[in-house]
Amino acid sequence: MRVSKLYAPTLREVPAEAEVISHQMMLRAGFMRKAAGGIYSYLPLAWRVLKKIENIVRDEMDKAGAQELLMPIMQPAEMWQESGRWDVYGDEMFRLTDRHNRNFCLGPTHEEMVTTLIRSDVRSYRQLPLNVYQIQNKFRDERRPRFGLMRGREFIMKDAYSFDRDEQGLEANYQLMYNAYTSIFTRCGLKFRPVEADSGAIGGSGSHEFMVIAESGEAEIVFCNECDYAANVEKAELFPIECAEEALQEVRNVETPECKTIVAVCEYLHLPVEKSVKAVAFTSEKGLILCFVRGDHEVNEVKVINACGVIELEMATDEELAAAGTVGGFMGPIGIDPTKVMVVVDQSVMKMHNFCCGANKTDVHCLNVNPGRDFKPTIVADIRLIQITDACPHCGGKISKARGIEVGQVFKLFTKYSTALKATFLDENGKEKPMVMGCYGVGVSRTMAAAIEQNNDADGIIWPVAIAPYQVVVVPVNLKDEASTAKAEEIYATLQQQGVEVVIDDRNERPGVKFKDADLIGYPLRIVVGPKTLAEGMIEAKIRKTGEVLHLSATGDYVATVQEILAKL
RNA sequence: CGGGGCGUGGCUCAGUUUGGUAGAGCACCUGCCUUGGGAGCAGGGGGUCGCAAGUUCGAAUCUUGCCGCUCCGACCA
């Protein structure tokens, strides 16, 4: 490719709309342009990167025994109604109607589609296991699209679905996919970490997320420094906290004027925060939920959702609190009827003695409260967020936190969809059984963005060779100098013949412009051909990642050298 | 959806407070010149100032409504 013909309009300045590095770089380097919020055109350079990622994904999927197919983006409402998700999915689903007023959606995911497809064709245990995948655009009307490709409303995803006779089969497929994902992200040149994850709205249980480690990541993960435990914070279990036994004392109320937060209350009463319990109130489709955790702990909403078996949580309003007989800032479990309001108490609170909490009256808190004696929870569960001071839930070791970009997730769905959608088969005994399913996603366009987040400097992108749009750019320094320009053309043609993915910057621009663009676009290797070095029989190869400059013989076998350099990057 | 900020040529922004008929830099076109890290000179093209109503002799500027973008909170690949 000749840069003079390449559709890659670079920008000198950072567009005001872009906040994160990957978004800024992709706009500046001419990789993409916005059509609407969270919706982008991929220009040729980006499309080459995406195809490279897709091909790595394909290769690993095929090796793991999955078969590629392509399902419709537009999906009829009926199958979603059958699974029950037409109503559950909410505003995040793009919906449309045809001329006959029939309802459709743009696929946010394909469990319904694939399950109804497979159920009509697979009748026997002999046809299982089966694993199918596709790479296509997905549509989700995000509440808040942001960060360019990191959270778009239309994005490219690889989604695979496995069907097995039993849970052992699922376990095997899950492991195959887990390993394939590890290979995919390794081959893409990314620093990543698989972590235990909550399975969320997709359903099922048992899940891992593949996180690309990056400061700009939206997810927070914890990992143990001593064992191999790693989890999304919203999933992370807690190492049990024990409390020393002490004699139970009588409950009494104290005035706590103007103390709206638990920290203020404890300061006012000269109590350690560990001797207090705070409350967070939510509303859900099952009504009000009062959650209680220790004063210095935080409520984990995902755990609350799972513990209560609800779909969504919202912060409760003052009116709802008043109706339940309490008041914001002074909520406590005493006197709340656990059969009318869900009183969800963190497991660690159940072990505390003589603690302080709200008295459900403005400016009043209770002292010496004890679980069991003074109140009855509706539910006791682990509902708190792990903190850096917590011990590893597996080995008790010291944990660390990091931020990550979720580029892939694997789920064990079990029979959630096959039961709802009646995807059954006959086993060897002629008995009808639901297929045991798994699903496995890779955010292809997000992976491209994540790669940039992890590989850039002040001058631009630094592509890992495996997913770079081109491997090499050849830069003739001065087009007026015939000898060096001819040499550059020769090198370009030769490399191309040898299968190197190469562009030549044949624009009649000053060298600075070409260098700046090459750095910005992030070609892994730049070959500069100019009169000065050529006079000495040399050409220059500069490695984008390290800045290292190598002088190669212009007449010798530079092709082999270039291939060696690329192989090492 | 709630809360902040912003919409002026392709990009970055000034002008809005105090209404008087639109500007700069970059990019683009032509010519000259220049060629190892975003050169210089000269000339040139391009904007119904997000949209719609309103106030006014007169609106980018004031008022109202709408739309879009963006950032902060809950979801996800």
Image: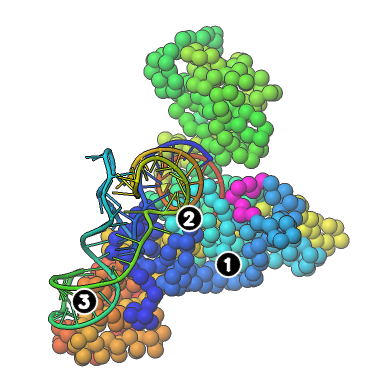
Give the mark nearer the N terminus: 2 vs 3.
2
The colour scheme used here is rainbow
Inter-mark Cα distance, 2 to 3: 36 Å
**Residue A515 makes an appearance in the image:** no
Q: Note whether A416 is above or below A160 in the view shown.
A: above
Q: Residues within 10 Å of mark 2 (few under 14, many from 20)?
A: some
Give the mark nearer the N terminus: 1 vs 2.
2
Dividing the image into 4 quarters, which one contains the N terminus of chain A? bottom left
User: Residue A542's spot in the image, x, y percent?
Assistant: 26, 74
Q: Residues within 10 Å of mark 3 (few under 14, many from 20)?
A: few
> At x 64% / y 54%, what residue is drawn?
A95
Q: What span is colored magenta in the figure?
A: A88-95
Residue position for label 3:
A510
Q: Is residue A369 magenta?
A: no
Tell which tag, 3 or 1, sits nearer the viewer.
3
Residue situated in front as seen by the camera: A389 or A37: A37
Inter-mark Cα distance, 1 to 2: 22 Å
Q: To which quarter of the image does residue A339 belong? A: top right
User: Residue A55's spot in the image, x, y percent?
Assistant: 52, 72
Provide the secondary structure element on which disc 1 rests.
Answer: strand
Residue situated in front as seen by the camera: A560 or B74: B74
User: Residue A199's spot in the image, x, y percent?
Assistant: 60, 48
Whether the residues at callouts 2 and 3 have beta carbons within 8 Å, the answer is no
**Three-letter code, disc 1:** Ile
* Parent chain of label 3: A
Give the mark nearer the N terminus: 3 vs 1.
1
Residue position for label 2:
A37
Residue situated in front as seen by the camera: B74 or B68: B68
Outermost residue, right side: A430
**Three-letter code, disc 3:** Arg
